[in-house]
Each structure stands twice: as C-alpha cells, then as structure tokens.
Image (cartoon, grey):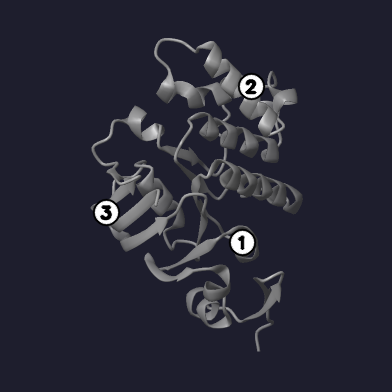
Amino acid sequence: MKLSVRGISFSYPSTKVLEEISFQVEEGEIVSILGPNGSGKSTLIKCIDRILRPQKGTVLVTERDTAPMKPRELARLLGYVPQSAVDSFPFTVFDTVMMGRRPHLAWSASQGDLDMVAEILKLLQLEGLALRHITELSGGEKQKVLLARALAQEPEVLLLDEPTANLDIRHQIEVLNLVRRLVKGKRLSTLVAMHDVNLASRFSDRIILLKAGRIYAVGEPGLVITQTTLRDVYDISVAVNQDSGRPYIIPLAPV
C-alpha cells in the first residue's frame, strides 16, 4: 500500500466539504474519484497534497505520515498535476519540466538531472517541443508537460486533478492512455479526480464515488457504476451496458 487516507475532513468557514474520507491506493493502481460538482473531488486531491490543510485526518505515503514533512520532502513523494497550466511566464518546456527536479537539487542541476528531464521528454514524446515556450502549446500539450514535470519529481504517488479538463476527446484518450501506461510501467500509485463516468470506467482499476463530501461507494468500475448508484448520486436515469468487461453509461431521456 502506497497511499492511505484516513478520516480526512475539511470545511471552509461556512461550508463542510469533506467528512471522514478513508481509502487506500495500492502500488501500480489507478483510482478515480467521481461525483457531482461540489462533492469534494478537487478539494480531496488538494488536501492530500497539503495545498489545503484538513481539519481532521491523516495521509500516509509508504506508511509515513505526511503532516510533519517539509515541502521538499513531500514533493519527493507526491506529484501533483493541476487542472490547467499557469502559463503567464514564457518558460520553455524543458525548463518547466526541470522545475520538477527542485526537490532533489542541491545548488544546481547535475548532468544526471538534465539526462532525466531529456528521458522524460522522450518518454512523453515532447522532445520536439523542448525549446518551445509553454504559452505556445495546445491544451493537450500543456497537460503532457505538467505530467512530465510531476514525473521529474520521481514521486511515489501521482495526484491528477481533472487531467482531461478542456481537452477534446482525442486528447482526453491520449492523455489517459499515457497515464495508464506510465502508472503500470513505473508502478506508481495514482489518484485521479474526474467528471466523465465513461472515461473513469475505461481507465481506472477502482472508483471512489463521492456524494456531498462522503464516500457513497468504492470498488471496481462494474460494482460502482450502476443504475442505482448513479441515480442516487447524480439524480439521473441511465442505461448501463458492458464493453470488454467495463461498464459504460447512456443517459436516458426524462420521462
């Protein structure tokens, strides 16, 4: 077990967002978080990465409590990929990915650091964009750069917050195929906040379904994605079919 979340609760001053959230993510496993808008998906990811501080609960990575860790130590364990890039400054793709090495650097980048960044760019097929400014890239290219930056941290756990947001279907599938290949190849533990039920079903090993800040269901896609659970959580009627052992939904017209 790489990531263990135990009893996380979080509230803003006037709103309770998460309540007693507990689950585990195993080595080489992709776990997706599904739920309606406002159910706490992104907040949960940010609590785990300590962007937000939960009022209650514990996050363990390889049995180590992350609460007392300094930021550099935490960044060696957790790689966070936000929904979209902040591209106000025209850094090159190479420099952006090199930023992921900061938790491991002493005074300056070594030849080993430079070689690692070059290897990651090649792995993600970004080497042709290395000297381009991130402000010049498409949405799909930016997402791959953010993923490359997180991989450069050499983390134990990847946290992805809506990695396919604002991407067309081709780039959604490309990014998620890439994530799955990397997770399985490098045995990373990966937690993904998603909106699309069908994409989550296709690419996840397990799914956590949130409702009003609590876990409503957790398990393999076939156990979690059912007519009953989706009606209860999303208040919609769907048909649930199977393809290659994976459920997919078709929304039904209201009666």
Residue 118: give its label.
Answer: 2
Tag 2: amino acid: Ala
Residue sitting at 52 percent across and 50 percent down?
Answer: 28
Disc 1: which residue = 196
Nearer the observer: mark 3 or 1; the answer is 1
Cα distance in 3D space between marks 3 and 1? 30 Å
- Tell me where residue 238 appears, x and y as whole percent: 63, 79
- Amino acid type of disc 3? Pro
Q: Amino acid at mark 1?
A: Asp
**Residue 1, image x, y percentages:** 39, 52
| Pointer 3 residue | 13
| Left or right: 105, with 242 as reference point | left
Between 231 and 220, the residue placed more toward the observer is 220
Of mark 3 and mark 1, the one earlier in the sequence is 3
Q: CA distance from mark 1 to mark 2?
A: 32 Å
Position of the C terminus, as image quadrant, is bottom right
Camera sees residue 230: yes
Give how far across and how far down residue 49 sits, in percent: 38, 42
